[in-house]
């Protein structure tokens, strides 16, 4: 990064990492703790096995985020995420499921169902 000191580059990288890791989260205040929706990319990246540098970085960032978030925030998921993780062919599928096991499940209402159906039509 041209024009940035190492400290500035590190701060920028940390900001980008935090944004990337929370881009799919839906924070909602609950007694001073954020409620964050954990979708399938979090456990998938947590147990990433690919050796390309960007995949290793995503795995490491996700592990760091998870370690912080599980202690400071309320992590929640839904049956839709559990179903998607169960259907996938991820090499560490059982580990992915175990990671989200015990998270509070949000009820799936009409708006969530529409979103899920739209996602699968596109995917």
Image (cartoon, grey):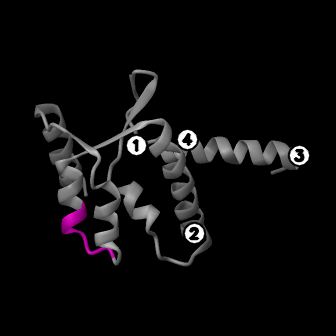
| Residue 68 percent across, percent down from the top left | 54, 45
Q: Which numbered tag is attached to residue 5?
A: 3
Per the image, label 2 sits on a secondary structure element best described as helix
Residue with the mark numbered 2 = 56
Mark found first going from the N terminus, 1 or 2? 1
Residue 19: mark: 4
Viewer-side label of 2, 3: 2
Write down the quadrant of residue 78 in the picture: top left
* Cβ atoms at labels 3 and 1 below 8 Å apart: no
Near mark 1 (Cα within 10 A), the count class, few <14, some 14-19 or many ≥20, is some
Residue found 26% across the figure and 75% down from its top? 89
Magenta region, residue range: 85-90
- Pointer 2: residues within 10 angstroms few (<14), some, or many (20+)? some
Q: Earlier in the sequence, mark 2 or mark 4?
A: 4
Earlier in the chain: of badge 2 and badge 3, it is: 3
Q: Earlier in the sequence, mark 3 or mark 1?
A: 3
Identity of the residue drawn at 30% across and 71% down: 93
Residue 29 rendering spot, x and y as whole percentages: 40, 23
* Residue at the left extreme, as displayed: 110
Distance CA(mark 4)–CA(mark 1): 9 Å
Q: Which residue is mark 1?
A: 24
């Amino acid at each position: 990064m041209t024009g940035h000191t190492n400290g500035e580059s590190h701060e920028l990288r940390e900001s980008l990492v935090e944004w990337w890791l929370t881009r799919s989260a839906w924070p909602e205040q609950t007694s001073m703790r954020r409620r964050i929706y954990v979708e399938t990319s979090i456990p998938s990246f947590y147990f990433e096995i690919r050796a390309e540098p960007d995949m290793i970085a995503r795995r490491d960032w996700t592990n760091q985020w998870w370690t912080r978030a599980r202690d400071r925030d309320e992590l929640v998921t839904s049956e839709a995420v559990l179903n998607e993780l169960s259907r996938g062919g991820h090499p560490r599928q059982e580990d992915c499921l175990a990671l989200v096991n015990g998270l509070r499940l949000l009820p799936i209402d009409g708006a969530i169902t529409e979103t899920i159906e739209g996602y699968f039509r596109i995917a």
